[in-house]
Image (cartoon, grey):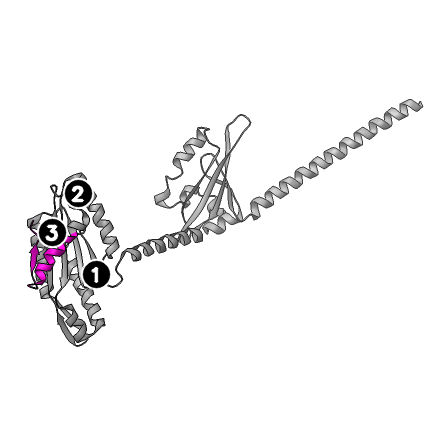
């Protein structure tokens, strides 16, 4: 064998060995990639699943079962829809339609699941489509993250904010609107009336001889009387009427869509209810009366808010001269 042929054979052999090593490395890398992917799927904290095009579970990881409470064999007999809260059943439907149409690749929703123990849990659900080279849907990769703690915290925060807003608008003692909140609401009613040309009425009421209650029974008794007095007024109004504590022992009531005759009847009914009120405090029975001033805003009125309140206040001032009576402002 010639020296040149030996060299050629050695080169060919070297190339062959290099190709073998290259193939070996590729196989090792592929195996490593499969191993990493499999372990990432199995051990991630996210619930992960492979879902068929007809939306049945094909493969489930450990976290998916931990989040939902079901075992893998149980889940493999189910579909994601079987876990979804009845009220959220159709939440994914429009997005799924877009995926099947090829308009979107994936989507995320926050919805409720029903845990195996019956409890409602919140999950952030992501569904991604995997397609063949020709674009046909092969399967879905589903991911869920337990959002129950975060959602509950969010709900509690919202409730706290709502409660804080209510407290900021409410008189702490009588649970009626405070003066500022009442004026804001009254301004809204005034604007509404200007648009609809429908009038409203207002009643301003003061507890008669309230100082005597405080002097004779103490301020705690006075506070209790204020609460019962406010309850008595509230029991004589409609759900859409609103009451505010205007100051001290004065209360103000707005009655939308109420004319002169109607407000006179309401005010008289309130006066009679207050007159019949007996407040039991410790071993004493405390009786009070009220002086009611009435004013009406109709489609012909041009009064400002302050002018309207001033008219009701003027009517109440006249009523206070007689005590336990209703007086209506007359222009």
Which callout, 3 or 2, points at the residue further toward the start of the chain?
2
Q: Which residues are magenta?
A: 309-331
User: Few, some or many C-alpha atoms within 10 Å of disc 2 (few <14, some 14-19, many ≥20)?
Assistant: some
Of all residues, the one furthest to the bottom in this rendering is 283
Q: Which mark is residue 295?
A: 3
Element type where label 1 sits in the image: strand
Q: Tell me if I can see residue 289 in this picture.
A: yes
Provide the secondary structure element on which disc 3 rests.
strand
CA gap between label 3 and label 2 equals 15 Å
What whole-number distance in Å separates the C-alpha atoms at marks 2 and 1?
A: 26 Å
Answer whether residue 328 is magenta in the image: yes
Mark 2 or mark 1, which has the lower sequence index? 2
Q: Position of residue 14 (x, y in %)?
A: 82, 30
On the image, the x and y values in percent for residue 47 come to 50, 46
Q: Residues within 10 Å of mark 1 (few under 14, many from 20)?
A: few
Quickly name the residue at label 1.
247
Examine the structure image and report whether residue 104 is included in the region drawn in magenta: no
Residue in front for this viewpoint, 263 or 216: 216
Label total for image: 3
Q: Which comes sooner in the sequence, label 3 or label 1? A: 1
Q: Residues within 10 Å of mark 3 (few under 14, many from 20)?
A: many
Query: Is residue 4 shown above or below 302?
Result: above
Q: Residue furthest right?
A: 2
Residue found 40% across the figure and 38% down from its top:
92
237 lies left or right of 147 = left
* Vertical side of 326 occupied by 299: above or below: above
Callout 2 secondary element: helix
Please name whichever residue, 111 or 156, is drawn nearer the observer in this view of the structure: 156
**Residue at screen point 15% across, 59% down:** 233
Residue 240 visible here: no
């Amino acid at each position: 064998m010639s020296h040149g042929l030996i060299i050629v054979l050695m080169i060919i052999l070297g190339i062959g060995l290099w190709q073998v090593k290259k193939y070996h490395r590729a196989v090792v890398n592929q195996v490593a990639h499969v191993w990493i992917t499999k372990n990432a799927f199995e051990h991630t904290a996210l619930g992960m699943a492979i879902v068929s095009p007809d939306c049945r579970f094909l493969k489930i990881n450990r976290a998916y079962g931990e989040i939902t409470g079901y075992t893998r064999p149980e889940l493999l007999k189910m579909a994601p829809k079987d876990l979804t809260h009845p009220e959220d059943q159709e939440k994914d439907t429009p997005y799924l339609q877009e995926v099947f149409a090829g308009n979107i690749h994936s989507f995320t929703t926050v919805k409720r699941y029903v845990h195996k123990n019956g409890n409602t849990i919140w999950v952030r659900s992501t569904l991604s489509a995997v397609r063949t080279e020709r674009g046909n849907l092969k399967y879905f990769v589903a991911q869920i993250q337990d959002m129950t703690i975060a959602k509950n915290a969010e709900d509690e925060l919202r409730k706290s904010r709502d409660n804080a807003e209510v407290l900021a608008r409410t008189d702490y003692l009588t649970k009626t609107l405070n003066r500022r909140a009442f004026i804001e609401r009254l301004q809204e009613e005034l604007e509404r009336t200007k648009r609809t040309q429908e009038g409203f009425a207002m009643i301003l009421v003061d507890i008669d001889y309230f100082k005597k209650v405080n002097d004779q029974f103490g301020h705690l008794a006075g506070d209790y009387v204020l609460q019962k007095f406010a309850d008595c007024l509230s029991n004589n109004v409609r759900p859409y009427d609103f009451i505010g504590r205007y100051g001290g022992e004065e209360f103000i009531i707005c009655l939308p869509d109420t004319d002169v005759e109607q407000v006179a009847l309401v005010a008289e009914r309130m006066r009679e209810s207050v007159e019949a009120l007996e407040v039991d405090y410790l071993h004493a029975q405390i009786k009070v009366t009220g002086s009611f001033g009435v004013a009406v805003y109709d489609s012909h009125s041009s009064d400002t808010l302050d002018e309207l309140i001033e008219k009701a206040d003027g009517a109440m001032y006249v009523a206070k001269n007689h005590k336990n009576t209703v007086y209506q402002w007359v222009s």
